[in-house]
Image (tube, rainbow, N blue to C red):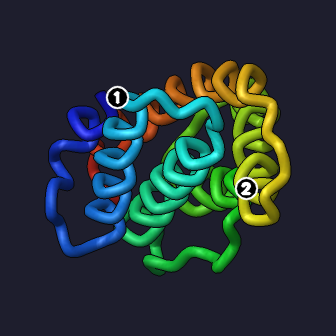
Amino acid sequence: MYAELLKDFENSENLGGKAWQHAVNIDLIEQMNIKDCSLHCFHYQQMLEMFIKYLLEMKSKYGLYSRTHKLNKLLEELIEYTDFKTNKSSYRMAIQVITVCVEEYRYNFLIDCDGYHDSVKIANELLKELLRFEKTETLG
């Protein structure tokens, strides 16, 4: 599903291509019987991070993005520096959960997989908005 959503970036040599690579990994993970959702969380966060950074690089006036891995911060940058508009409060908690989940993954903490998957459902709507925005004209 995710690789199909990001198909336009298949093997691209940019951050959009990196997002597609993580999407492929998510699709593979979803086909396996893995009880722990931390690997899924890692690749999902990376997919969103790479795609938002790609949009910042391609659609902001200066083509820059911060070095943060925090999805809320990146979303705020995207809203501030591009023409992307959304109700960020509707995504704030979901992408915060995903960010924290990845931090917990790095330290091998147990992850609340039910809460994580609920957040993914919400974040998927953001991903669809980002994909629609990607198709729009860039700043002049």
Is residue 18 left or right of 109 when viewed as pictured?
A: left
Residue annotated with mark 1: 31
Image height check: is 116 above or below 84? Answer: above
Q: Which comes before the other along the chain, label 1 or label 2? A: 1
According to the picture, the residue beneath numbered tag 2 turns out to be: 105
Q: Is residue 44 above or below residue 103?
A: above
Per the image, label 1 sits on a secondary structure element best described as loop
Residue 8 appears in the rendering: yes
Residue 73's disc number: none
Judge whether residue 140 can be spotted in this image.
no
The C terminus is located in which quarter?
Answer: bottom left
Q: Amino acid at mark 1?
A: Gln
Task: State the image coordinates of residue 64 (x, y, percent, origin top left).
Answer: 51, 79
> What is the total number of numbered labels drawn onto the structure image?
2
78, 67: nearer the viewer: 67
**Compared to 124, does 17 lie above or below?**
below
State the residue at coordinates (64%, 24%): 117
Q: Is residue 72 above or below residue 30?
A: below
Q: Position of residue 125 (x, y in %)?
A: 52, 24
- Is residue 103 rendered to the left or right of residue 74? right
Q: Is disc 2 surrounded by few (<14), some (14 to 19) or many (20+) residues within 10 Å?
A: some
Give amino acid for label 2: Tyr
Choose between 116 and 94: the one closer to the eye.
Answer: 116
Q: Quadrant of residue 107?
A: bottom right
Element under disc 2: helix
Q: What residue appears at the point 20 percent right and 54 percent down from the top-left corner?
A: 9
Residue located 36% across and 48% down the image: 25
Q: Is residue 60 left or right of residue 88?
A: left
Q: Circle 1: is it few (<14), some (14-19), or many (20+) Cα within 10 Å?
A: few
